[in-house]
Amino acid sequence: MIPTRDQALDLIRQHNQEASHIHHALAVEAAMRHFAELYHEDPDLWGIVGILHDIDWEETTQTPEKHCHIAPEILREAGVDENIIRAVQSHGYGICTDIEPVTQLEKTLFTIDELTGLIITAGLVRPSKSLADLELKSVKKKWKDKAFARGVNREIIKQGAERMNMPLDDVINETLIALRPVEKLIGM
């Protein structure tokens, strides 16, 4: 089954209580929908994957090597389609899984999962605390500062952009464009 957006939101909320984790799911959803439209793919399906990608996050925070390993059990129990489960697992490639992202959906999720965090953090440190006036050059400046958003794995984002066959600047800019309309929804 491919869950509806409401079903996906209910499922993620059953397994993640922290508002920041729900905000992250919604940010990744927005970015995935945006890229789906760029690639002429199904934005509803891509958005569902974005919502569900970290479904096991709160259950694995103390054991990060298990992230993406509990998710299949949760999603199968809910009757979620195996293609969605594989996409969810592939976003941890090289970190906690050996499931390589091969479809455009998987490659995009792999890339923008980390990137959304960097962009949101860059927006929050601006005087406006907004993405509305955040530009690509400001994000790139923050990118170069290794102390800024230290937890964001920039190498994963660079590898992901290569997998997507899209210049890194374009990936960053498109993700920024995707997040602007939902900044209130994602807790900014």
Image (cartoon, grey):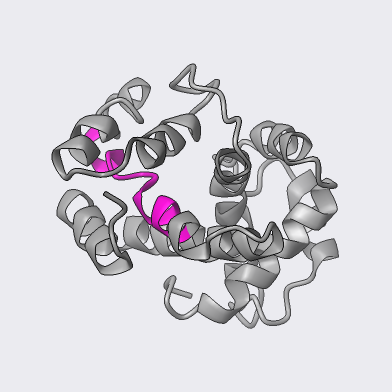
Residue 132 is at least partly visible in this image: yes
Question: Residue 90: percent from the left, percent from the top?
Answer: 48, 31
* Residue at 31%, 53% in the rendered image: 2
Question: Residue 138: percent from the left, percent from the top?
Answer: 80, 64
Residue 141 or residue 161, whichever sits in front = 161
Farthest-out residue, top = 98
* Residue at 27%, 31% in the rendered image: 72
Residue 18 is at least partly visible in this image: no
Magenta span? 47-60
Q: Is residue 79 magenta?
A: no
Residue 126's quadrant in the figure? bottom right
Q: Is residue 53 magenta?
A: yes
Question: Residue 184: percent from the left, percent from the top?
Answer: 46, 80
Decide whether the magenta segment is chiefly helix, strand or loop.
helix
Question: Residue 44: percent from the left, percent from the top?
Answer: 45, 64
* Residue at 33%, 60% in the rendered image: 22
Left/right placement of residue 45 relative to residue 82 reads right
Above or below, 16 against 92 in this view is below
Above or below, 134 against 136 in this view is below
Above or below, 178 against 159 in this view is below
Above or below, 60 against 31 in this view is above
Residue 75 or residue 111, whichever sits in front = 75
